[in-house]
Every structure is written in C-alpha cells, then in structure tokens.
Image (cartoon, grey):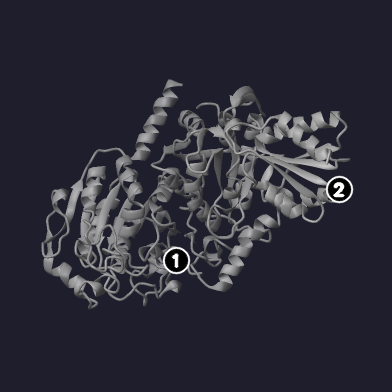
Amino acid sequence: MSHKTTRAEAPQELHPMDWWLRSERMPHIWCAGCGIGPTLYAWARALDSVGIRKDKVVYVSGIGCCGRGSGYLDVDGFHTTHGRAIPFAVGIKLVKPELCVNVISGDGDLFSIGGNHFIHACRRNVDLLVICTNNFTYGMTGGQLAATTLRGDYSTTTPYGNIEYPFNTPHLADASGAVYVARWTSIHVRQLQKSIAEALRMKGLRYIEVLSPCPVNYGRRNRLREVDDIAKWFWQSFEIRNGANTSEVEIEKGKPLILGNFIKREGKLSYYEELKKLEEKVKKAA
Amino acid sequence: MGKVVLSGKHFWYGNIAIAEAAIAAGCRFFAGYPITPASEIAEHIAQRFPEIGGIFVQFEDELASMAAILGASWAGAKSMTSTSGPGFSLMTENLGLGVMMEVPTVIVNIQRGGPSTGLPTLTAQGDVMQAKWGSHGPNEVIALSPDSPQEAFDLTIRCFNLAEKYRVPVVLLASETVGHSAGKVVVPPEDEIEIINRKRPSVPPAEYLPYKPDEDLIPPMAHAGEGYAVCTTGLTHDERGYPDTTAETQETLVRRLNDKIRKHMDDIVDVEEQHMEDAKIAVVSYGQVSRPAKRAVKMAREDGVSVGSIKLITIWPFAEKVIRKWAKQVDVFIVPELNYGQISLQVMREAAGDAETYLVPRMGGRLITPLEIYQEIKKVSEK
C-alpha cells in the first residue's frame, strides 16, 4: 500500500495535497458540489502550515458521508460508530496527549445522535479539534430531517416542511465551554484554513462549523437543485462578523449568514492538564 | 508513587478485587458511568488511578464509556469499563465495534435482575445470552464468570490476557452477589502474575497491513501515533483496513473474526469438574450459583447419589466439548441458573440425543440455596 512519510515521496504531478491522501482509494464517494472535500483540503493545508507531523495526526470520524473521510487521509484514521467519534477520540487523546486528535464529522453525527458527547466534551474542555461539516441534512441515508435542518425545509421525512427549530451549533459550543468557536463555509477555504490553523495552535476543545453544500440530498428538495446553488446562497448572503455574540448567529434563510471566528478563550486548562494537576496533588499528599 | 500491585492477603468485596486485578493486569484507562451494583469498581479506580498514573474518566453515559475504552486501547493502553444490565445494553453498541476493529478491552458486567431497570440492588444471571448476542451481527466474544471475590480477581486478570491475546473485547460476567460479597483475596507477588500483551507489528509501516492476520488468525496491532497510519473502520474491510462492502470480503473477515476464537477453544475454555468419574447426574453451574451447586452435590453424594459438578468458568465460547463428552456418561444435566434458561439451552443443544437437560430456574433477587439444588438432585435421582 502507498504510505508516504515525507512530502518529497509524493509524485509531483499529482494533486499538491496528494501526500496527505491514500490516493489508491480515489475516487472518493462524495458527490459533485459536496463541501467535505474543500473542508478536508483546508484542514490538511492548515496542518501543513502549523507544521504538525503527519504521524502525529489522528482523524476520528463517525458515520455518514463525512465519516468516510478518515479512510481517505494517510494518517491514523478511525471510522467509528454513529455519534461516538468524540468519546472514542477522547480515549486516544488522554492516553497519548502528544497526538493531534481531530474529530471531523457531520451534523447528524455530532449534534443528533452524538449531541450529548459534544456538549460534555466542551464542558470538560478535552483537547480536541472538532470540525462539523453541516449540510443541513442526512446525506448518506438519502436526505432526512436533521437537527440542523432549517425551518420550513423539505426533506424525505418532512415532506410537508420542517416544523422544528435547528440548533445554533456555535452557540451550543460556546455555552458548553468550548475555548474556540468559529463558523465558515466550504467556499471560504482560505478563511477556514486560517481558522483551523489558529485552532490547531490552541489547547482544549475547539469547534469549527463548516456550512457545506449537499446539492443531491438537500438542495434538490429545497429549490437549490443545481450543483452550485447552495454555494451561491452562501456567497450571496454571508457576512463576516468576527467576535459575534454566538446567540445572534442562528441561520435563517433570507437573512445574512453570519460567519467568523466567534470565541477565543485563553488560559483555561485542558482536561488532560487538569488531570495531571490532580495527579500531582494526590502524589504530593501521599 | 502508590503501590501498583497490592501483593498479600486482603478481605475485599468482589468489586474491589476486580478493580485491583485490573490495576495488577496493567489497566491504565478506565471509562465508566455510575450504576448499581457496579459503581464501587469505578469509585475504587478513581481513588487509585491518580496514585499510579492511570486515566479515569466518568463519562456522560455508557455509550461514550465504551467508545472511549476502544480509543484508549488503540492508543496503546489496557482499558476497562464496568457496568450492570441497563448500562451493558448501551455498551453492546460499541462492543460490536470492538469486535469488528479487533480491540483488546475488558467490560465488567455486575449482573442485576432484569428486564429493564429490574432489581438494581439484587443479583441475577440474566445477561448471559446478551453478552454473546447483544450486539448485532454474527460475532464471537469471550466471557468469563467468577463465583467469589478471589475468582473475580483471578478472572479479571485472565480477561485482560485473553483480550490482549485474541484482540477482542472480553466480558467479565460477574453478578451482584459476587461484587458485593466480601472474602479473602490473595494477591500474588507481582512477578508471579502472568501478563500477556498484544502482538505488535514486526514490519516497517510501508509493509504493514493492519488486518493481515498471522497463522493464528490474529493480526498484530499498531497503535495511533506510531507512524503506521492505521486505517480502521466498523465497515466490512480488507486487510488494509479499507472499507470493502462485498460478499467475498464479508465472508473472509467475519469467518476469521469468529474462527480466531473458535479455533482456540482449548486455550480459552476453562471448567472445573468434581466427582464426575462415576456421575450419572451432573450439575452444570457458573458464577456464584456454582458455590451452592457444589455444596448440594456434596450433600447428595453423602446420600449415595452418583452426582458430579461441572462449573463453567468460561461462559463464551461455550464448553461444548466438555458437555458432549460427559453427555455420553451421564443421564441428566441439572442446570441451576438465575434466569429462565440461558446456559441450559446450550447444554441441551450439546447433550441432545445423549442426555437429558433439567433446568432449575430462579429469576434472581436472591441466590439459590444448596438445599434447593439438593432437593432437585434428589428429585431427579429418584425418577
């Protein structure tokens, strides 16, 4: 199997990010217009820019379209069960705190079935980078209602329109104690990359929401049928408001889409640091 | 640094013995969620781990706890969780992932009465079938069942060793009466405790295939952060760990996951036999029921009844060879258990055509007494 330990070993004529990829697994399963690819591109670029060694990078994912990502990158990749990527990653990180542990998963995985783990990981301030590609739906299973589906949207399980309110995930992360909270879209690749790089330099629970088009299973049912319709919606309505109050960044159609780096809390110890501090206290008392 | 292995004689509750055995076996990562009657294990670990450099986390639920011990094992730690019925039901989700990803880890189930919330503070043996079949899909797990605090200690260490050797989650099927009864526990000197560690890759990363098994059907395990770019998934996968959802790969993989246990039955299966030489009746028991069962056998033998005892120490994989062998000699297997018939079904299956199986069921809540089992032996012997 191909296993590229240095950038120089990647053939130059391939994609510039090839050295991060298990290229023998291409083509991937994602549809045209999907935002997962650009998100992973920004993530890998950010890792390069921060200078994190590839053999120290761990990628944990859950189930769904986004779950497949951990198998495409040439790093330690763990494709776990639906919703459980975060606690699985916590286990890895606490045993090997020197590793750069990332959870990259979808909105269904992180905020429906795995919602409890998300808020508790934020509360504990576990040293993880959590990236959510929010495509407002369950893509892989065919476009059902998600906890992020906007009011009035159509999905295969809301054929008459959605009556529920979606999560404002940056606000949830903020309220639960995450030390870094940002939102970008998959078309804001540069800003996203910078935001990820900034998050990678921090400790504790860092959360970035990436709004991501799903033309096939979301757009098709919501008058955003063409491959670039959702990207156009993002482009026409985004407004960058760094430092915005996260309670004011709900997503509503017809209103500005608030993006930016919202929260940066310095000085809060990560869960592992707290554990070590406790260990010292116990040992001293013994 | 606190003392790691507490060699010497102790008077311990079963739950404390389990926690200390885990520490002695090298467990340094524990994730769990409070539940009666298992909480003392977590509480004891929470107290001990900071002294010896272990990581204890009380998670938000059993789903997370189970996921975390898998992750910790992938990072190289020996890991464990403890729970009881309702929590075990949640853990079966990622027990399946542990089987599929081939993760060594230990799950302690201090059984209580069910179904559902049932009898939180009282004993039962209702989770025997669940331990094997609780997770969807055809899989083999290993489960051991102790009858006392001492055996809880010994078998917990064996659980870790089997998990490491076969790269599989191993279940310690204890019960409330074992967890909450106190008894003498002898902890051997550290150098006399047998410790088995998982097989590690002997080839450089470029040649390593995470799911290429050796001849014993078990693949060596690389950890996260070692440069092997481990690729693993709960999906059906090939030797590279890449998803390959075809019938052919499913056939190869799932057969191997089962066969790596089935082909090592002689190593894994452990039973204790007493008075079987001339037995025409055999009492088959496991866990705490084996103590009154052995007593009842002794009482019946004093009356001249040709009865012996087979105590199952390994519950899964089932001791089918043992039952088949004795089925040729005995007329009846009496199976007392604290459920409405679980292991008795296995006994019946193996004994079919050669010997009868006679179930003595109790639904849990209290331990069956020697006298009750004795009366059943007499009833059967007088038929």
Packing grade of label 1 (10 A; few <14, some 14-19, many >=20) is many
Packing grade of label 2 (10 A; few <14, some 14-19, many >=20) is some
Can residue B51 be seen here? yes
Residue B216: x %, y % from top left = 68, 58
User: Which residue in the structure is indicated by mark 2?
Assistant: B329
Residue shown at 26% from the left, 45% from the top: A178
Q: What residue type is labelled 1?
A: Lys
Which chain does tag 1 point to? Answer: A
User: Which residue in the structure is indicated by mark 1?
Assistant: A4
Q: In this view, does A13 lie above or below B234?
A: below
In the image, taking residue A91 as reference, residue B11 lies left or right, namely right
Dot 1: what SS?
Answer: loop
Q: Which amino acid does label 2 sit on?
A: Gln
Which chain does tag 2 point to? Answer: B
State which mark lies toward you, 2 or 1.
2
In the image, taking residue A205 as reference, residue B253 lies left or right, namely right
Asked if the residue at tag 1 contacts the one at tag 2, i.e. Cβ–Cβ closer than 8 Å, the answer is no
Residue A44: x %, y % from top left = 33, 62
Q: Quadrant of residue A233?
A: bottom left
